[in-house]
Amino acid sequence: MASFIPISQSQTLFNNTRLRKLPPLFLPSPNLGSDFLAKSGFVRFQNPRGITGLPMKTANVVVSATTAEKPKKRYPGEAKGFVEEMRFVAMKLHTKDQAKEGEKEVKEPQERPVAKWEPTIEGYLKFLVDSKLVYDTLEEIIEKASVPSYAEFRNTGLERSESLAKDLEWFKEQGYTIPEPSGPGIAYSEYLKELSETDPQAFVCHFYNTYFAHTAGGRMIGRKVAEKLLNNKELEFYKWDGDLSQLLQNVREKLNKVAESWTREEKNHCLEETEKSFKHSGDILRLILS
Ligand code: HEM
């Protein structure tokens, strides 16, 4: 997993308890590619003592800005707010075909071009059922708000649980048997419940990625599957009350506000969770092809 190392003024990297708990520093993520961190600008070393040529792991690196230097914006998207930082990390985890900013290699079936997918109704139903479990879970967590800041995300208009219930009812009326939730949905739901109690920054990463992905790639997938399997019927899952771009903007502002109270380290921890969000959502997407 990638480690996004904060570069704050006069901070010794290895003195920090949270960082000590993180996986080995500077190891490139298999998904992000070996030069991701360097290219993305997440890790930029300033070595004020002029230690050069030492392996990074062993150098006692102190990152500091000299008094003469102006502080720089070091995190892509930072100037626009934290959502832009989360988006930047998410976009890199797409394949080139999925999105032009994507950098990930195609490894899993659901990462192949959507146009070439061969979905099945049974698979799509499994996907909808597991998605409903995930949205039910997210929406219950937000409603309960065991962490007070979660209450900011109540009634955003992005909720999907009820619309999915209507869609599953429609499939039932058409004579289909609705399956029980399967492994990927159950595993993600359990993970989200645990995270919501123990790790609010990581939980917010999943909240952002799940709702925003669905309005982008998710909608595109919905259109393609409807074309192939449902005679172009548009499901409720892909309809929102009101102006979707305004709803998204309102949630971006709330996310930015919540993240304003986080330390740089907490923000980086949230960004690092993006890969797990892709992993779980990818497992659920793959059901469409089963
Ligand atoms: C077949 C799978 C996928 C496809 C085809 C796809 C495609 C896309 C596209 C076309 C965009 C819009 C790019 C733009 O604004 O220029 C997008 C945005 C995004 N995707 Fe995906 N995506 C996929 C899977 C995922 C997954 C699994 C996640 C994470 C769970 C994810 C998270 C996001 C996020 C957070 C955005 C930004 C949305 C925004 O800015 O409003 N995507 N995706």
Image: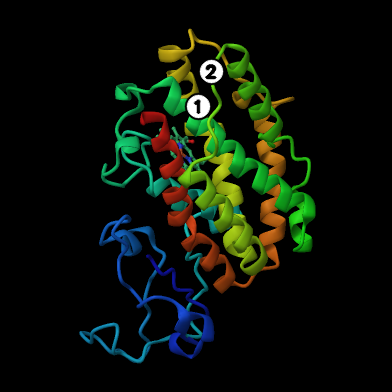
Residue 62 visible to an observer of this rendering: yes
> What residue is shown at x 47% (from left), y 76% (from top)?
7
Under mark 2, the amino acid is: Tyr
Query: Which numbered marker is on residue 226?
Result: none
Residue 210 x %, y %: 56, 44
Residue 30 x %, y %: 28, 59
Q: Which residue is mark 1?
A: 125
Q: Which residue is mark 2?
A: 176
Q: Nearer the viewer, residue 249 or 66?
A: 249
Which one is closest to the eye, mark 1 or mark 2?
2
Q: Residues within 10 Å of mark 2 (few under 14, many from 20)?
A: some
Question: Taking 73 as reference, is 36 left or right?
Answer: left
Residue 64 visible to an observer of this rendering: no
Q: Quadrant of residue 29?
A: bottom left
> What residue is shown at x 61% (from left), y 26% (from top)?
237
Q: Quadrant of the N terminus?
A: bottom left
Residue 228 x %, y %: 40, 13
Task: In the rendered view, tell whether residue 116 sits above or below residue 135.
Answer: above
Task: In the rendered view, tell whether residue 174 sits above or below residue 71.
Answer: above
Chain-order first, disc 1 or disc 2: 1
C-alpha distance separating marks 1 and 2: 9 Å
